Image (cartoon, helix red, strand yellow):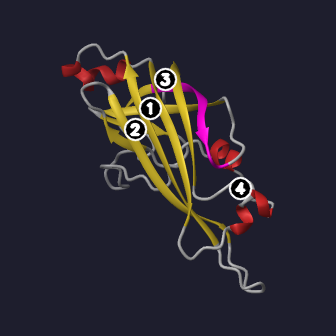
Amino acid sequence: MARPSCRDALVALPFVLATAAIAGGSGCSGHDPYRPGESVGVFHVTSKLVSTSCGPTPDPWEFDVKLRHDQTTLYWVQGDAPVQAIVDRAAHVVLKTSVVNTVRPADAKTQTAACTMARTDVVDLVLAPVTDPAMVAKDLGTATSFKGTLGYQFAIVEGSSCEDQLTESGGDFDKLPCSVSYEISATRTGDAK
């Protein structure tokens, strides 16, 4: 079984979305939970590595994300359920989500506990242009770019055995817990259908 490297964890899942709750997105509401609100657009994101304690990490790193909005609620749509947060009057928003995954199941033969890791992702960004702070809800749909930071934190869940994930044991993480931080900038490339 291949071990998930820090690089693989970042490239395969640019922003963990599995645990995000969607306001008003239940199956009975008539709303598509994967296309909430109105389109802001598709954005091409370029990430420059600021720091990492996890090990080999892509730098630079590029990916695409869809942004949608409902008034001042911004949705980051990429893969699974969208992550949402409220945009303030300065067009600033912090999107955060966490997920816990079993990286390796327990092995009864060797009496080794499962390796379960928690991952927390945080995107802190400012949309542009927003010309009138009093009209931020209206202006969100006209945003053409954003800048900010993107961070990841990986930690071993209590009771887990993840020593085999460390580089000294043939794994891909230099240490756990660890973190990765990027500066990001993005330009709108199209409409988020």
Query: Which SS class for mark 4?
Result: loop
Q: Which residue is mark 3?
A: 191
**Amino acid at pointer 3:** Asp
**In this rendering, the label closer to the viewer, 2 or 3:** 2
Residue 39 occupies quadrant: top left
Residue plotted at (72% across, 52% down): 5
68 relative position to 5: left or right: left
Q: Give the residues in magenta.
A: 41-54
The span from disc 4 to disc 1 (Cα, nearest Å) is 28 Å
The spot of residue 142 in percent (x, y) is: 37, 18
The span from disc 2 to disc 3 (Cα, nearest Å) is 14 Å
Query: Which SS class for mark 2?
Result: strand
**Neighbours of disc 3 within 10 Å: few (<14), some (14-19), many (20+):** few
Q: Is residue 99 magenta?
A: no
The earlier-in-sequence mark between 4 and 1 is: 4
Magenta segment's dominant SS is strand
172 relative position to 90: left or right: right
Q: Which residue is mark 1?
A: 67
The span from disc 4 to disc 3 (Cα, nearest Å) is 33 Å
Q: Is residue 52 magenta?
A: yes
**In this rendering, the label closer to the viewer, 4 or 3:** 4
The span from disc 1 to disc 3 (Cα, nearest Å) is 9 Å
**In this rendering, the label closer to the viewer, 1 or 3:** 1
Residue plotted at (65% across, 56% down): 175
The answer to whether the residues at label 1 and label 2 have Cβ atoms under 8 Å apart is: yes
Depth order, front residue of 39/29: 39
The spot of residue 139 in percent (x, y) is: 30, 20
Q: Which mark is residue 113?
A: none
Q: In the rendered image of this protein, does residue 135 appear above or below residue 152?
A: above
Q: Which residue is mark 2?
A: 75
The spot of residue 22 in percent (x, y) is: 36, 49
**In this rendering, the label closer to the viewer, 4 or 1:** 4
